[in-house]
Amino acid sequence: MNNKTILREKLRESVLSVLPIAVIIMALCFTVAPVSTDLMLSFFIGTALLIVGMALFSLGAETSMTPIGNRVGAAMTKSRSLMLIVLISFAMGFAVTVAEPDLQVLANNVPHIHNLVLILTVSIGVGLFLVVSMLRIVFGVSLRWLLLIFYAGMFALAFFSERDFIAVAFDSGGVTTGPMTVPFIMALGVGVARIRSDSNAETDSFGLVALCSIGPVLAVLLLGFIYKGDSSAAQTVTAAYRDTVELGHSYLAALPAYLREMGVALAPIIAILAMFQMLVFKMSRHSFFRMCVGVLYTYIGLVLFLTGVNVGFSPLGGVLGGELATGGTKYVLVPLSMLMGWFIISAEPAVIVLEKQVEEITSGAIAGRTIKRSLSVAIAAAMGLAMLRVITGLSIMWVLVPGYALALALAFLVPPIFTSIAFDSGGVASGPMTATFMLPFAVGASAALGGNVLTDAFGLVSVVAMMPLVTIQITGLIYQFKVSRMEREAVLHGDMDIIELWGESA
């Protein structure tokens, strides 16, 4: 399959991801929540850039990030050097997280922490916990016990942390498991898992995303003890243009800034690729050139994606949230958010990958549509809970502590593979649409209601990342029940056959 065919497929996936939420937004703007014409036009341009950017980025990630992860993992497998695994895992985890688009969007929305400080803090957290993940695979440590220990420590730290940092910290864990990080981390894990030859090696290659999402939370919580942000800076992002020329200038002015930022963000990955090519890979010129073209696609896609999001998409989300939060329409915020959540996850391309994965693991006992339905329910419920927090000011801890307690309890009841898939599925659920539109939407609604944006609106991504942990593991319980019932029926049927045969011989 050539790049043109793949690009068409990626464009189709991007349209399916963005179109449902775009249609809902337009319906609201043309009926109950009027916005200015210039903002609506900016939204259309931003949507087009978002679709093209996502397609190019996905193509680049598939042709560069995943192959790099596979090759680096294979190189570490051949070396079998523990120190090399530690150093490379940290470097690669840090590098790919710096370039993660969802993290860039979150950093632009967090008002009281400098963008660079937040990005570097989160990237260090991912790098350290990618090392933990690799060591877990090498030594075959149980995922459920690691999750129990780290989540207990994480929530204990949260109770002593700065209030304005808690929700942002948990959101950081959700956005880092995005379209840049996940394919690379999964590919790296599969490569390292080849070091072991036992039957559990393949199963242990899952759960990487789950552990890597803990690192940023701990890192940002610790940041709160040493970094004093300005909580008074919290405000919604709005945009107003006198004419179409000024609107065009806003996009043209944003492009150079994002070209520079993404160049800096991707520089470590390019340097690592060049180093491995000279010392380890030694690919043919054609293969190396193809991988470099993939990095270029990634770069252009990231620039277009962030320009469309930050100039046209997110500002409308903030304004629309504010419009709906005033007057009688504030009572539709919860059901409307649930509707958006249902369509966001239903159109997420990564869900298709998860469906196939579960069908293969269970040999068809759990249908892909069952996983998709459980995820749709999870994200709809998560969006409803998040918006309820915006309206009532409910602390994020009242949602996350019971939710994760239930998820960890289920981890000891379901087959281990479902625990790994469930905790990885949070990265699937908290996709680009959650950070780019729903978070600004919640921020706008919170500001209009006079709430504390940092404690009431932020935390939405973390709730979205948490809910699938429960629903997927419940699906695992259903699978376990089905298997047990089939085994009992098989035993019973076998006993009946023995009785019949014995009767005939008599």
Image (tube, helix red, strand yellow):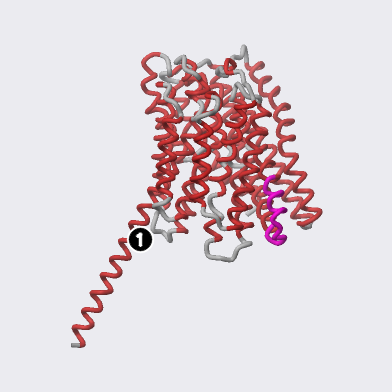
**Residue located 49% across and 24% down the image:** 457
Q: Position of residue 29 (x, y in %)?
A: 46, 21
Q: Residue furthest top?
A: 242
Q: Residue furthest right?
A: 278
Q: Position of residue 136 (x, y in %)?
A: 58, 53
Q: Quadrant of residue 230?
A: top right
- Frontmost residue, 319 versus 243: 319
Magenta part mainly helix, strand or loop? helix
- The total of numbered circles placed on residues is 1
**Secondary structure found at label 1:** helix
Residue density around tag 1, few if under 14, some if 14–19, many if 20 or more, within 10 Å: some
Q: Quadrant of residue 223?
A: top right
Q: Position of residue 333 (x, y in %)?
A: 40, 24
**Left or right: 303, with 321 as reference point:** right
Q: What quarter of the picture does the N terminus occupy?
A: bottom right
**Residue 204 against residue 343 in the figure, above or below:** below
Q: What residue did someone put label 1 on?
A: 483
**Residue located 53% across and 33% down the image:** 157
**Residue located 46% across and 39% down the image:** 466
**Residue 440 against residue 492 in the figure, above or below:** above
- Magenta-colored stretch includes residue 80: yes
The magenta segment is 76-90
Q: Position of residue 111 (x, y in %)?
A: 60, 21
Q: What quarter of the picture does the C terminus occupy?
A: bottom left
**Residue located 48% across and 50% down the image:** 144
Kind of residue at badge 1: Val
Q: Residue furthest bottom?
A: 506
- Frontmost residue, 219 versus 96: 219
**Left or right: 207, with 487 as reference point:** right
